[in-house]
Image (cartoon, helix red, strand yellow):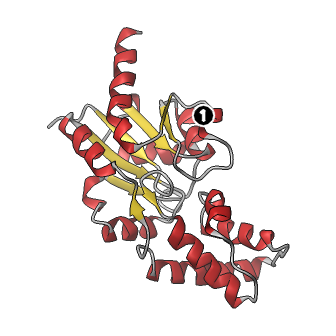
Amino acid sequence: MTSVGTIVFDLDGTLVDTAPDLINALNFILDREGLPPVPLHAARNMIGAGARRLLERGLELEGRSVESMDINRLTSDFIDHYAAHIADFSRPFEGLESALDDLETRGYRFAVCTNKLEWLSKLLLDRLGLSARFSAICGADTFGVSKPDPAILRQTVARAGGQLSSAIMVGDAGPDIGVARRAGIPVFGVEFGYTEVPIADLKPDRVIGHMKELPAAVASLMLDRKTI
């Protein structure tokens, strides 16, 4: 089937609810450093800028800063622990797979563009049985840039075999809206992800509250494009 377009997804907070395993890994490090754990509800919105920044923010909550050497060591330990427990509790958001099935029958291809490391992203999606659904899975280390730098999105679409002119970004936070705007493509925001700023305030082209709404949102955008 010829692709009619490429839908590019953020990973954490968009495709998969990864917060439980990420925060468990953060709390493993905090506990080892003699610091109290961060509650899940308080830490969800700290996710999205990569492992190092999550760890820095977790330490900042306790009023602690560390030298670069320590952050490098702690980040490495965090990643090791997280990789070993990457899908203990992480699960796709409800309605994701049926939405992908629907869109696939319409001829869309899918890609992942995340600030997570590529190998961790692939490991997670492998464990959840989702990797085969994506034509490309690209992380912050894949091209040497991260969101909102538009180069990561442009190159993700190219690696998936798509065209930027027929691509859509789907994400849950500022970097996703920013990367799409800078790359010049439409962007949908999901309300169930990890962001300190309400996604609607970032003014994406569409806002969806559940993955089951995605196919209709795509159809609506395509209709608008045809009538312009």
In-front residue for pair 25/176: 25
One can see residue 197 in this view: yes
Residue at the image position 72 percent from the left and 71 percent from the top:
58
x, y percentage for residue 8?
40, 44
Rate crowding at label 1 as few (under 14), some (14 to 19) or many (20 or more) other CA atoms within 10 Å: some
Residue at the image position 58 percent from the left and 49 percent from the top:
147
**Disc 1 element:** helix
In-front residue for pair 180/64: 64
When asked about the image quadrant of residue 149, the answer is top right
x, y percentage for residue 197?
68, 43
x, y percentage for residue 34?
75, 89
Residue at the image position 45 percent from the left and 39 percent from the top:
169
x, y percentage for residue 39?
66, 70
- Answer left or right for 9 relative to 135: right
In-front residue for pair 56/179: 56
**Vertical arrangement, residue 115 with respect to residue 172, above or below:** below
**Vertical arrangement, residue 127 with respect to residue 97, above or below:** below
Residue at the image position 68 percent from the left and 87 percent from the top:
31
Question: Which amino acid, mark 1?
Answer: Ala
Q: Residue furthest right?
A: 63
When asked about the image quadrant of residue 61, the answer is bottom right
When asked about the image quadrant of residue 145, the answer is bottom right
- Answer left or right for 52 relative to 223: right
Counting every numbered tag in the picture gives 1
**Vertical arrangement, residue 46 with respect to residue 126, above or below:** above
| Residue bearing mark 1 | 200
**Vertical arrangement, residue 211 with respect to residue 31, above or below:** above
- Answer left or right for 77 relative to 92: right
The C terminus, quarter of image: top left
The N terminus, quarter of image: top left
